[in-house]
Image (tube, helix red, strand yellow):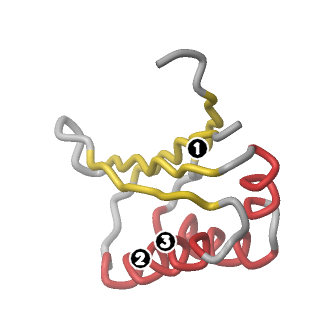
Amino acid sequence: MPVQIMIKRKWQVNKPEDLLPLLAELRSRAKEQAGYISSETLRNLDDPDEFLVISRWETADDWKKWFHSKEKRDIQGKVDSLIGEKTFYDIFETVSH
């Protein structure tokens, strides 16, 4: 069953030019993974430093495999060190349409 991953980041980055390529790399690498469907990035209008990525995967196991990969952990570590905060993840499944 398809799942949606909510990836929440709040950042106050002095050098966004260092962060944006890392975020693009995460998305590019995710697209290559088995089970990846799509993703989109949203910015909070009330708090412009807060971003939400909605990532869609065929199964929770597909997502977890990518999430726990060394490749993802390495890039994510760089992101978290730049934003100075932890990135939060929640996995959702559809219960009705």
Q: Nearer the viewer, residue 3 or 75?
A: 3
* Location of residue 59 in the rendering, given as x and y in whole percent from the top left corner: 73, 46
Q: Amino acid at mark 1?
A: Ile
* Location of residue 14 in the rendering, given as x and y in whole percent from the top left corner: 31, 73
Q: Looking at this view, name the residue that lies furthest to the left.
A: 45
State which tag comes first along the sequence, 3 or 1. Answer: 1
* Location of residue 54 in the rendering, given as x and y in whole percent from the top left corner: 46, 47
Q: Residue at x 60, y 17 (%)?
A: 95
Q: Secondary structure at mark 3?
A: helix
State which tag comes first along the sequence, 1 or 2. Answer: 1
How far, Cα to Cα, is label 3 from label 1? 22 Å
Q: Are marks 2 and 3 in contact (CB under 8 Å)?
A: yes
Q: Residue at x 36, y 55 (%)?
A: 41
Circle 1 sits on which residue? 5
Q: From the viewer's perspective, is residue 3 above or below residue 57?
A: above
Circle 2 sits on which residue? 19
Q: From the viewer's perspective, is residue 23 above or below residue 7?
A: below
How far, Cα to Cα, is label 2 from label 3? 7 Å
* Location of residue 12 in the rendering, given as x and y in whole percent from the top left corner: 33, 59
Circle 3 sits on which residue? 82
Q: Secondary structure at mark 2?
A: helix
